[in-house]
Image (cartoon, coloured by chain):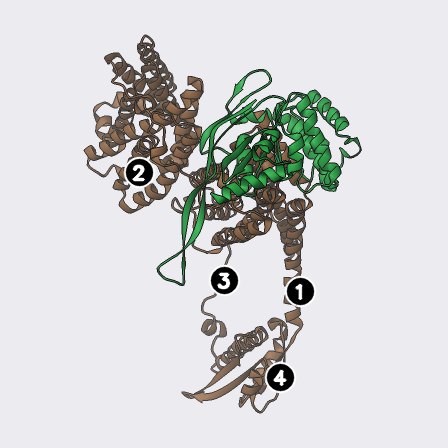
Chain colours: A brown, B green
């Protein structure tokens, strides 16, 4: 991929899109005018309807009611409180009149068990009738109250003691911002997703089907660029438009809702809202919406690419739009929450995340899952898009018969090394497999779910490598290590462990809450027999994660990058893979040491050994913490207590010494990869 | 110089067949050769005409030669003016100017903007690009409308803009797929003259056409293809002698009749 070529292609796509008035209307005018108009209009209409209802006269009748004068009196007296006005009409056949809507409601009565039973007849299908019935119902309540008071007075009793022995009241402890947020959280996702789709769809069709329809696609194909560069420049251009439209939407919505609430606040008697409390929500929304815009763009383009004309593309995109919209309604379901399970479902996770942040619930672990899964979905969709666009059948509109997205294994070249595309695909697949299969299994089978999760990590790189007939020995650095290498692994482990303990302690002091969460999940796993725990949580990750990260990931990256760069990227991916802010830096650091060790010894087994030792010691200490503290209080305090500064520095020195010794052991060997 | 060896392209088409249930037809996928093992070579300063009825495989052949399509079998190689042998499609495209009825232009850009954009993609510097654009505008007499949006141009002006597109990177090889189709006499002549000019400059020209008179006086060599295979190859004169005819049109009829009789 050439950056300069991509840049000129991208520039051309953007110029083309921006010169199209329709796109600009969809992107700029819709969010900037439609929302304000819609929301302001709705606010005004709702308040107008409400006041209209209050002014309306409702026609009601009393049919065979002996005490109707009393009821009329009560209604008349409490006119203000009821805030609706009723006119009483007389009628011969109230049922017929009600059915014919000449009446809004009527009251009838009968003697039952020695007292009077009133019936309020109304039509629930008619709004006016319902209102009238409600007013009558309230009137009857008032009448009963009055009659009670009379009775109490007749019997010479204390009114308060008999009728009101207790009093009660509801107090809303939510702040005004919270109740506003809860309301916003249920509508904003839908509005935002719909508007991003609208922003992305038009240019997506324009650059794919529109291009075919105008006949400029073949012109593009005569240029000295690869199809992948072409589609990426198109993708980037549409994403930019989708992102701009997402951004404009959020800003416009913030403005419109701001207006709405200040309007409501004014009418509610000058309550002041603290808009600043929504700034984090808005910022997170913008970030997550940008990632989502990438996904929407790629998905829309994947569909539109099959169409030969604008019209056809419109037909294809409609069901997609419906799926997006229906999924975005999920935020309105009251008990549908963002959990580890729902955080991986596309579209729905975005909806629930926005709902959460507007409800001031910040669960950064889940946010990270939403962010990364969306990134994974986007990347996967982009790769599919690239594959489709590479097909001549699609480019020259020859139908789908020869479209090929995945190559058969028999077509793979033997001994090939994976490329960046393979790596991205592998990471995305693993990520989604961990979320879907892994988290399902963990919820369902507890400890054995962790086993399944580890199995996924272990199997995916092996299967992918088998499928593409890669050179296993080269990619995964499979080589028996020498004695020196084994000692090096142990030394690096010891050094890494010391420094990591230090890092973890310092970091968890900053992020107390998440560290506690981490601890609880660990405890629950430790209930199993120790041998099993060691197998599932030390041996399996040591093998699986090493194959995945130091094997496949590092093996692929070092082909085209400097070793240090490859190590850094590997360790960042390894750190992110643990989905925890507290763990990010320590695991990233560990990942770097592992990658360096594997690189310098040329053997994945040294990495596996170090990884095993690291996990094993952590497990051992957590399991036998009490016994250890009892037996070696000084040592434990020194290693894990870290109470005093002296220990911090000491640990640091020990760690660095071990690391230096470890890597010196490897420096003489010629076994580098 | 452009060389193609055993070039083939296989397409899949769906055929409706009678099935056992009389009311329904079964759709069957069938592979067929749109281009069937064609080898050819075009030298510098040569104009090669590709003739054939509709559906003969002319467009597919030219698309493969222009590296827009990947051949199912065989390969295309180019020797550029510096004597380098090119095999990579992206590199080859830099030496090819490809024009067909399907290569439309971007309506929302002006000719000048389009040339600048293309020049950047072909790797020209900004100054080179400007210089080259000016030259092209002079040669093709486009000064008066080179800053108008392409959607506002007339058919003849658009055709000139299309030629300008093929010229910006000064290619060694021109591949034109029915370039004069549907044009008025003036515009068609302009294109024919353009090809002659390029021949004089030592460029290689490949073009397909239905206008046999045009091919007769323009082409150094012609290739008649039918159902993906070469029927006849040679200079127009040779072909006329072989078929004992006065012009290419008659020769074409004679050759096609021969095929039908077989």
Cα distance between the residues tagged 2 and 3: 51 Å
Q: Are marks 2 and 3 on the same chain?
A: yes
The reply to whether discs 2 and 3 touch (Cβ–Cβ < 8 Å) is no
Q: Residue A48 carries which label?
A: 1
Q: Are marks 4 and 2 on the same chain?
A: yes
Packing grade of label 2 (10 A; few <14, some 14-19, many >=20) is many
Disc number lying in front (2 or 3): 2
The residue beneath circle 4 is: A88
Give the mark nearest the N terminus, 1 or 3.
Answer: 1
Packing grade of label 3 (10 A; few <14, some 14-19, many >=20) is few
Residue visible at 47% across and 78% down? Answer: A157
Q: Residue A169 carries which label?
A: 3
**Chain under numbered label 2:** A
Cα distance between the residues tagged 4 and 3: 34 Å
The residue beneath circle 2 is: A453
- Identity of the residue furthest to the right in this view: B144
Q: Is residue A472 visible?
A: yes
Residue B75 screen position, x and y as percent: 47, 27
Question: Quick one: A182 or A287, which is closer to the camera?
Answer: A287
In the picture, residue A340 is in which quadrant?
top left
Q: Residue A428 carries which label?
A: none
Residue visible at 53% across and 43% down? Answer: B257
């Amino acid at each position: 991929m050439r950056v300069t070529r991509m840049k000129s292609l991208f520039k051309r796509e953007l110029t083309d899109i921006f010169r199209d008035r329709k796109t600009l209307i969809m992107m700029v005018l819709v969010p900037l005018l439609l929302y304000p108009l819609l929301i302001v209009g709705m606010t005004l209409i709702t308040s107008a309807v409400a006041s209209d209802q209050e002014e309306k006269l409702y026609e009601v009748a009393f049919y065979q009611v002996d005490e109707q004068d009393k009821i009329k009196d009560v209604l008349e007296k409490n006119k203000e409180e009821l805030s609706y006005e009723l006119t009483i009409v007389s009628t011969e056949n109230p049922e017929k009149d009600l059915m014919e809507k000449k009446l809004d409601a009527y009251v009838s009565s009968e003697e039952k068990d020695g007292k009077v039973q009133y019936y309020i007849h109304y039509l629930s299908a008619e709004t006016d009738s319902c209102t009238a019935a409600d007013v009558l119902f309230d009137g009857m309540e008032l009448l009963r109250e009055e009659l009670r008071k009379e009775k109490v007075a007749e019997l010479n009793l204390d009114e308060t003691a008999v009728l009101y022995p207790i009093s009660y009241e509801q107090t809303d402890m939510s702040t005004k911002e919270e109740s506003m947020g809860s309301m916003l959280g249920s509508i904003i996702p839908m509005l935002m997703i719909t508007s991003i789709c609208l922003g992305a769809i038009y240019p997506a069709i324009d650059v794919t089907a529109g291009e075919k329809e105008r006949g400029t696609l073949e012109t593009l194909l005569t240029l000295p660029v690869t199809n992948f560069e072409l589609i990426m420049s198109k993708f980037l251009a549409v994403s930019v438009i989708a992102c701009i439209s997402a951004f404009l939407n959020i800003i416009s919505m913030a403005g419109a809702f701001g207006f709405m609430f200040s309007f409501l606040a004014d009418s509610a008697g000058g309550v002041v809202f603290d808009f600043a409390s929504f700034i984090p929500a808005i910022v997170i929304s913008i970030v997550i919406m940008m990632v989502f815009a990438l996904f929407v763009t790629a998905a829309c383009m994947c569909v539109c690419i099959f169409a030969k004309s604008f019209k056809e593309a419109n037909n294809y995109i409609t069901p997609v739009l419906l799926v997006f919209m229906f999924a975005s309604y999920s935020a309105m379901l009251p008990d549908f929450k963002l959990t580890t399970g729902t955080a991986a479902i596309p579209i729905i996770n975005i909806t629930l995340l926005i709902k959460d942040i507007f409800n001031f619930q910040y669960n950064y672990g889940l946010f990270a899952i939403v962010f990364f899964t969306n990134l994974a979905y986007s990347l996967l969709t982009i790769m599919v898009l690239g594959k489709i666009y590479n097909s001549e059948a699609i480019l020259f509109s020859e139908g789908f018969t020869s479209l090929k997205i995945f190559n058969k294994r028999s077509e793979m070249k033997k001994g090939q090394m994976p490329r960046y595309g393979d790596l991205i695909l592998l990471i995305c697949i693993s990520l989604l497999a961990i979320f879907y299969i892994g988290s399902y299994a963990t919820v369902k089978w507890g400890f054995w779910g962790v086993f399944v999760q580890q199995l996924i990590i272990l199997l995916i790189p092996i299967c992918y490598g088998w499928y593409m007939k890669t050179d296993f020995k080269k990619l995964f650095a499979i080589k028996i290590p020498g004695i020196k290498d084994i000692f090096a692994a142990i030394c690096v482990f010891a050094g890494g462990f010391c420094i990591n303990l230090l890092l973890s302690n310092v970091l968890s002091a900053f992020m107390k809450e998440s560290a506690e969460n981490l601890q609880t999940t660990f405890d629950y796993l430790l209930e199993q027999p120790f041998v099993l725990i060691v197998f599932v949580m030390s041996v399996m990750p040591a093998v699986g994660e090493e194959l995945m990260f130091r094997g496949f990931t590092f093996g692929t990256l070092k082909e085209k990058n400097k070793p240090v760069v490859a190590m850094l990227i590997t360790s960042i991916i390894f750190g992110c893979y643990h989905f925890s802010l507290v763990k990010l830096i320590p695991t990233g650091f560990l990942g770097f040491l592992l990658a360096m060790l594997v690189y310098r010894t040329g053997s994945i087994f040294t990495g596996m050994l170090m990884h095993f030792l690291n996990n094993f010691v952590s497990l051992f200490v957590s399991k036998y913490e009490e016994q250890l503290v009892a037996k070696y209080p000084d040592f434990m305090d020194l290693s894990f207590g870290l109470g005093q500064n002296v220990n911090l520095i000491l640990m640091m020195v020990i760690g660095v010494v071990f690391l230096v010794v470890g890597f010196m052991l490897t420096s003489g060997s010629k076994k580098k990869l | 110089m452009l060389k193609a060896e055993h070039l083939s392209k296989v397409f899949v088409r769906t055929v409706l067949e009678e099935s056992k249930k009389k009311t329904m037809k079964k759709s069957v996928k069938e592979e067929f050769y749109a281009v069937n093992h064609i080898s050819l070579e075009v030298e510098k300063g040569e104009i090669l005409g590709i003739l054939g009825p509709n559906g003969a495989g002319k467009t597919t052949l030219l698309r493969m030669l222009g590296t827009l399509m990947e051949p199912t079998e065989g390969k295309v190689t180019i020797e550029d003016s510096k004597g380098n042998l090119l095999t990579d499609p992206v590199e080859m495209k830099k030496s090819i100017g490809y024009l067909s009825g399907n290569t439309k232009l971007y309506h929302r850009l002006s000719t000048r903007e389009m040339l600048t954009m293309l020049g950047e993609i072909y790797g020209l510097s900004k100054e080179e690009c400007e210089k080259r654009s000016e030259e092209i505008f002079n040669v093709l007499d486009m000064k008066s409308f080179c800053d108008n949006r392409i959607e506002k141009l007339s058919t003849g002006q658009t055709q000139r803009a299309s030629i300008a597109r093929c010229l910006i990177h000064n290619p060694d090889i021109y591949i034109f797929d029915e370039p004069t189709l549907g044009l008025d006499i003036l515009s068609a002549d302009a294109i024919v003259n353009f090809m002659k000019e390029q021949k004089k400059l030592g460029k290689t020209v490949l073009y397909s056409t239905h206008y046999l008179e045009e091919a007769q006086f323009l082409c150094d060599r012609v290739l008649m293809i039918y159902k993906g295979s070469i029927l006849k190859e040679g200079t127009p004169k040779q072909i006329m002698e072989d078929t004992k005819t006065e012009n290419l049109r008659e020769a074409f009829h004679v050759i096609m009749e021969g095929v039908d009789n077989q």
